[in-house]
Image (tube, grey):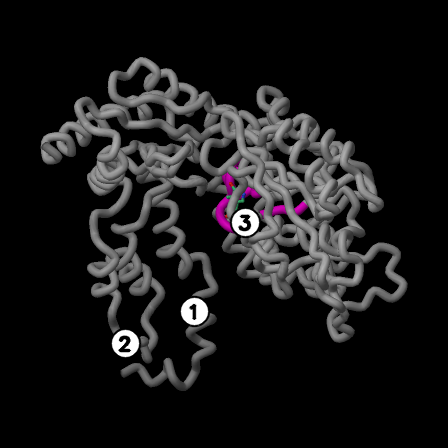
Amino acid sequence: MNNEDVVDPLSLLEADTSLEAARPILELAANYLTGTRSGEGPVSTWHSAEVIADRLNEPMPRRSRPLADVARRLSTMLLDDVNRLAHPMYIGHQVSAPLPAAVWTDALISALNQSMAVREMSPSFTPLEHQVVEWMTDLIGWDSRAGGTMTSGGTEATLTALLAARSRAVPNVWSHGLGDHAPVLVCGEHAHYAVSRAAGEMGLGVRRVVTIPGVDHCMSIPMLREKLSSLRASGTRVMAVVATAGCTATGSFDDLNGVADACDAFADDHGPLWMHVDAAHGGAAMLSPTHAHRVAGIARARSVAWDPHKTLLLPLAAGLLLMREEHDLEAAFAQKAPYLFNHNDDARAWDIGPRSFQCSRRADVLKLWVAFQRYGADALSSLYDKLCRTAQALHGLLEAHPQFAPLHEPMSNILCFAWNPPGVELGDRDALTNALRERYNRSGRGWITATTLDGRRVLRVTVMNARTDVPHVEALVAGLEAEAAYVLKHHR
Ligand SMILES: *Cc1c(COP(=O)(O)O)cnc(C)c1O
């Protein structure tokens, strides 16, 4: 036993501060990023959670080890079984193959550990967050009344926006609760579960979420108007209408001008209905001359959720909540905490804590700022275009395919498609589709997702990796064909 470890723990910390000491960990990250470039090697693992859990099952370490040893253990115990999102054949969930400059910045954010709760804890990063938020609200087309906060993601951003909308609809809700006349919340049937979850969380109840059917996976505007009209006739107040810009399942965009027109037409005594746009996935379209038309009308929203950790390819976590009027956010949290928040005579209330869900909060804004500094908005916009083009290329391949059929035109980087195996009854198709995905993913040759669309199991890809290109979606189709043949043979 090395007694010095116990006697002087600080020396352990000091030993880890140099670049030399950090190298074994940093090398794991760099070797991963460069080593996946060629597209060789497995994309994921075939090991079950139990096998991996067994390998990890050991008592809490009581003694120290050199950091280099820890890096070796980390590598052998864990890294073989990760999902390699940077591998060009990972075309799975909506999680990015992250921008390298932002990856390296994560270490700096942790080293500095500035908390975004109040300005005095983050003297340079609080103004930075206001600046980056301003870039984004300018992009939307809002004026200087706008503001916002970074969030852990779209779920938190949407909850926060809806808390603000709730305060507007029920002004003393913070002290008195919702009372007897709780309003309803309206969204498309393809809205992310963050919306109904928020309804549950804020005491509205998921039964007060009114969903509007979709046409081609976008909210039907005539049906929205019909519903708003019948709600008005029954004297039911509408707290907010949530539109989605980049639906999770299909990447489709609601008609934001259509939703905004309806919100204007059904104004109540508080003014036009509160329109929240969940652009967690599709917000990056705003940067792209090719795709900006998808979000036409977004400036008419009162609040917008946008996740840079989705199609801006930031590493987790980087979410944004943007408000057309910053003061709406104050109403979301009517919290008093004199030991922390002290607004006294500050001309601008710099502190973001009073306006956000979290108290202690990472300065994730720094990696977003670094991403813009390093790549520029133009490259980020081209990357988004490329993700979408790759999805379009897969769509083209599948249109001509005898067994696989695309289920929609991709409006972004997401595509759902069906497997129509020959000679298989409809009732068996869902199970076979699940089996095909499972086999393909376990083969290591690629990784995709599945979802339920219009009542049937379908395959789904989201292109979240700039390395994924036409040859890779060709390889995906070839890989699925090979595994499909196996699944079919064993089905009969
Ligand atoms: C991903 C997503 C969310 C949830 O965002 P998180 O960052 O995972 O919390 C919400 N809405 C849409 C449309 C999404 O795609």
- Residue tagged 1: 15
**Outermost residue toward the front?**
234
| Drawn side of residue 49 relative to residue 151, left or right | left
- Rendered view: 66 above or below 450: below
Q: Residues within 10 Å of mark 3 (few under 14, many from 20)?
A: some
Type of the residue with mark 2: Pro
Q: Residues within 10 Å of mark 1 (few under 14, many from 20)?
A: few
Type of the residue with mark 3: Ala
- Residue tagged 3: 194
* Residue occupying the point 21% across, 47% down: 46
In primary-sequence order, the first of circles 1 and 2 is: 1
| Drawn side of residue 131 relative to residue 13, left or right | right
Q: Secondary structure at mark 3?
A: helix
Indicate the quadrant where residue 126 lies. bottom right
- Rendered view: 141 above or below 329: above
| Drawn side of residue 295 relative to residue 174, left or right | left
Part of the protein shown in magenta: 307-321
Q: Residues within 10 Å of mark 2 (few under 14, many from 20)?
A: few
Query: Which quarter shows the C terminus?
Result: top left
**Outermost residue toward the top?**
400
Marks 3/2: CA distance?
37 Å
* Residue occupying the point 54% across, 55% down: 108
Q: Secondary structure at mark 1?
A: helix
Q: Nearer the viewer, residue 65 or 342?
A: 342
